[in-house]
Image: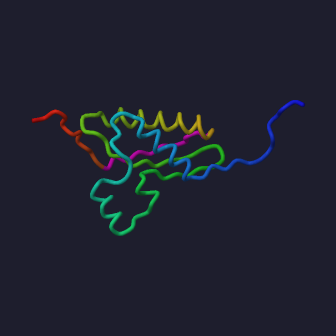
Amino acid sequence: MKQGAIAGETIIDDEVIASIAGIAAREVEGVASLGTSSIRRTLAETVGGARQQARGVLVEAGKKEAILDLTLNVTYGFSIPKLVNAVRERVAERLSEMAGLVAREINVTIVGIEFPEKRGAV
């Protein structure tokens, strides 16, 4: 018997798409963290801010395309324009590979700069 594709609908929840995008963004060197700045993050945790926003990824997805809003903190010393381009490319690539979605738009907001710890400093 020949095997073929079985018909049916696949729905990928926005939370899953947000997770894929978040992991992909963190794969890019220079991305310190996702989410709001440390001051806003502390405030949001204190007053119970939105879970999805605290993670730093908002998603609007259809069956074939997605629009994403990423909120990032970057590591001091990296070129922000180059970093943002690398994040957009990585996120689009991972969404295509893992979910079969085309990233129609990836908006990136930089909300903070984190300084790397000095290692071996006396």
Magenta span contains residue 107 = yes
Report the residue at 35% width, 45% height from top.
Answer: 33
Q: Which residue is farthest left?
A: 122
Residue furthest out toward the bottom: 47
Task: Judge from the rendering whether residue 90 lies leftward or rightward of residue 120; answer left or right.
Answer: right
Q: Residue at x 59, y 50 (%)?
A: 61
Looking at the rendering, in which quadrant would you find the N terminus? top right
Q: Residue furthest right?
A: 1
Is residue 68 shown left or right of residue 85? right
**Residue 114's spot in the image, x, y percent?**
26, 44
Residue 12 horizontal/vertical position (percent): 63, 49
Is residue 42 located in the magenta-colored stretch of the structure?
Answer: no
Quadrant, the C terminus: top left
Which residue sits at x=52%, y=37%?
92
Q: What secondary structure is the stretch in magenta mostly built from?
A: strand
Residue 28 point in image, percent of width and height: 40, 34
User: Looking at this view, is 108 or 4 the one in front?
Assistant: 4
Q: How is the image coloured?
A: rainbow
Q: Residue furthest top?
A: 2
Q: Which residues are magenta?
A: 101-111
Q: Residue at x 52, y 43 (%)?
A: 20
Q: Position of residue 77 (x, y in %)?
A: 24, 34
Q: Nearer the viewer, residue 81 or 122?
A: 122
In the picture, measured across the screen, residue 9 lies left or right of residue 63, that is right
Q: In the image, is residue 69 above or below residue 40?
A: above
**Left or right: where does residue 101 sit relative to residue 70?**
right
Q: Return the residue nearer the eye: 25 or 2.
A: 2
